[in-house]
Image (cartoon, helix red, strand yellow):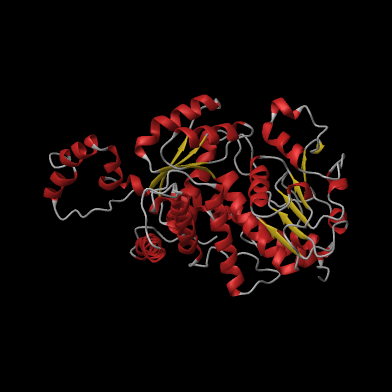
Amino acid sequence: MKKLTQTEIDALIAKAKKPAADAMLLHPFYKGKYQTVPKCCIRDFNDFAIWYTPGVAAPCKDIQANPEKSFEHTNRANTICVLTDGTRVLGLGDIGPEASMPVMEGKSILFKYLGGVDCVPIALRTKDPDEFIRTAKLLEPSFGGFNLEDIAQPKCFRILDTLRAEMNVPVWHDDQQGTAAVTYAGLVNGLKFVGKDIGKVKVVFLGAGASNIAISRVCIKGGVTPENTIMCDSKGTLHKGRTELKETFKEKWHMCEISNKWDVRGTIVDAIKDADVLIALSTPGPGTVKPEWISSMAKDAVVFVCANPIPEIWPWEALEAGAAVVATGRSDFPNQVNNSLGFPGIFRGTLDVQAKTITDEMCIAAALELAKVAEDRGLKQDYLVPTMDDWEVYPREAVAVGMKAIEQGVARITMTRDELLKKATATIKHARETTQALMREGFIPAAPAS
């Protein structure tokens, strides 16, 4: 890649800063990002006798006799809770429940517009994992699933594992499973683009938080050889000598046991040498990853720098340093490895078959379908994964997830592939057209110029 001029670099940096400026204009303008509107007809005031008392008593008694009927008589089958304690929000850290709500509302409109999934964002004023778990279980009758969001580690692992085991609706932690699915899709296509075998490449993970631990797990299930990986946390590489992790962080210790066949004991500088892949979800940059580290990687290196809100290294710097392809978590750069490509379609498929859980295999099925959409359109250096504009991504993912859930025996409803595609497509199309109609008729006012 040719070296960028300072003028070009300044323009790219200015572009990267614009979303934050626009957000400060538009959030107070709209005073929130979602609202509730009826989905039933209200022909006249007599209809309230159907939707409320006295008519509503009949479906209430039907649900009392069979609680599963709540998925039929109410919107529960298509409603999830976006639940957080605000302890690890984006790249901002522990900013508290109130400050987390713009993110939770944003997540909710992505679910709705991209996946046709209705959401209720809830931020809890507690940092106690047991209280969080108890609260989620108390809320279960109201929702068809839970999306856990922005919870600090290591408690996020126990919260997810406990709720998945003890609740009768799917519980998903997007920072773990969602990030993992989309990153795996990018990895599959990145390696196809450079012509490398997923089972033979050396993969370095920079950052040992919830996201990268989940990514490593999914990548290994998807074909990466575990001993060919090295994970780095803030203290350096993970290896069998890090015995302090046995009692304090079982997920990190597991990586110590299965990875790093070279027994590299040092920092990311030591680990990254001759690596084919870097997957970084660590401290926001720029400057967290140095260009010279990229230069020390193997030829045709695949680089993922996905810290928010700023990647660990600017993508053009990584390309100039020798990377073959670079992905980030930002929509204003090519190759956005972003959860928004995964969770709407994955939850759409999960809800359509009323799956009891979301397995790693369901995530991998979604990732492979996501990768296939981009492959069908032609892989390029700046096109490893589809964008949110690619309409077909979400129903195709939903079908892949639903079929895998049926195959694994975790679905309450059995449908054919064609039936799943028809249902997902119609639901997502309805959500998008509803939003467009509200804008067209002025019920959602036009945004002021920025």
Rendered position, 344 above or below 171:
below
The number of discs equals 0
Percent coordinates x, y for residue 57 in the rendering? 16, 38
Tell me if residue 309 can be seen: no
Percent coordinates x, y for residue 1 in the rendering? 81, 70
Q: Nearer the viewer, residue 49 or 435?
A: 49
146 sits to left or right of 441: right
Residue at the image point whose x is 45% and y is 43% from the top: 170
332 sits to left or right of 125: right
Residue at the image point whose x is 31% and y is 47% from the top: 75
Q: Nearer the viewer, residue 247 or 427?
A: 247
Q: Nearer the viewer, residue 24 or 430?
A: 430
In which quarter of the view is residue 196 placed? bottom right
The image quadrant where one finds the C terminus is bottom right
Percent coordinates x, y for residue 311 in the rendering? 71, 52
Percent coordinates x, y for residue 349 in the rendering? 44, 55
Rendered position, 396 above or below 33:
below
Residue at the image point whose x is 57% and y is 47% from the top: 177
Rendered position, 354 above or below 127:
below
Tell me if residue 299 can be seen: yes
Q: Nearer the viewer, residue 287 or 300?
A: 300
